[in-house]
Image (cartoon, rainbow, N blue to C red):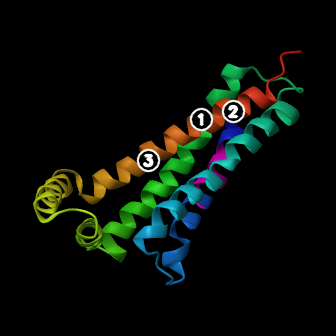
Amino acid sequence: MKNTVLKYGLYGLLSGFILFGLPFIFGMGVDFDYGELFGYTAMVLSLLFVYFGIKHYRGKVNNGKVTLGKAIGIGMLIALFSAAGVAIFDYIYTTQINPDFATEYYEYSVKKMETTLSSEELKIKSAELKQQMDDYGGSGFMAFIMFISVVIIGFIISLISGLILQRKN
C-alpha cells in the first residue's frame, strides 16, 4: 500500500501544483470570474489519481480485492498529496508571484457588488468583506483553506472510487 500511495500521491501532488498554477506559469493569468472554476477543475483533475491509485492497489497489489474502508484510506492519503500540491502553489502565488492578490480580489469584489447593491448595502458588505480579508486573508490561511478544500473533495472522490472499485472476494 505504501508504494501505491507514494507513487499516485506524488502524481497528484505534481499535477495539483502544475494544473493549479498553469495559467500563471504561462503568464495567462485568470480573471476572477473564471479563476474559481479553473481552480476547482484543477483540484478535481489532480484528484483523479485517487481513483487510479485505488484501482492499482486492488488489481496489482492486493489480488483484485479492496474493501470500501481500505479504498477510502488509500484515497485520502493520495488526496493529501494533491492537497499539498495545490496549497504549496497557492502559498507561493500569494507570497511571491502576486503578493497583492488579496487587495486585487477585494477591489474586484467591491466593483462587482457596486452593480447589484444600493450604496448603503455596498458600504456594509464592503466593510464586512474588508474585515474578512483582514482576519483571514493571509497567505498561510488561504493556502490552508485550499488544502482543506482539496481534502474534502478528495474524500468525496475516495468514497465514490471505493464504492465503484470495492471487491471483497
Q: Amino acid at mark 3?
A: Phe
Report helix, strand or loop for mark 1. helix
Q: Is residue 7 visible?
A: no
Q: Is residue 62 above or below residue 115?
A: above
Q: Please identify the quarter of the rendering in which residue 96 is found.
A: bottom left
Q: Residue 9 in the image: state x and y as whole percent.
A: 63, 47
Task: Decide which of tag 3 and tag 2 comes sooner along the chain.
Answer: 3
Q: Give the position of the N terminus as an image quadrant.
A: top right
Quadrant holding the C terminus:
top right
Element type where label 3 sits in the image: helix
Which numbered disc, 3 or 1, marks the residue that appears first in the sequence?
A: 3
Residue located at (55% from left, 41% from top): 153
Per the image, is 13 magenta? yes
Residue at 83 percent across and 16 percent down: it is 168
Instruction: Determine contact: label 2, label 1, CB under 8 Å.
Output: yes
**Which residue is the site of mark 2?**
160
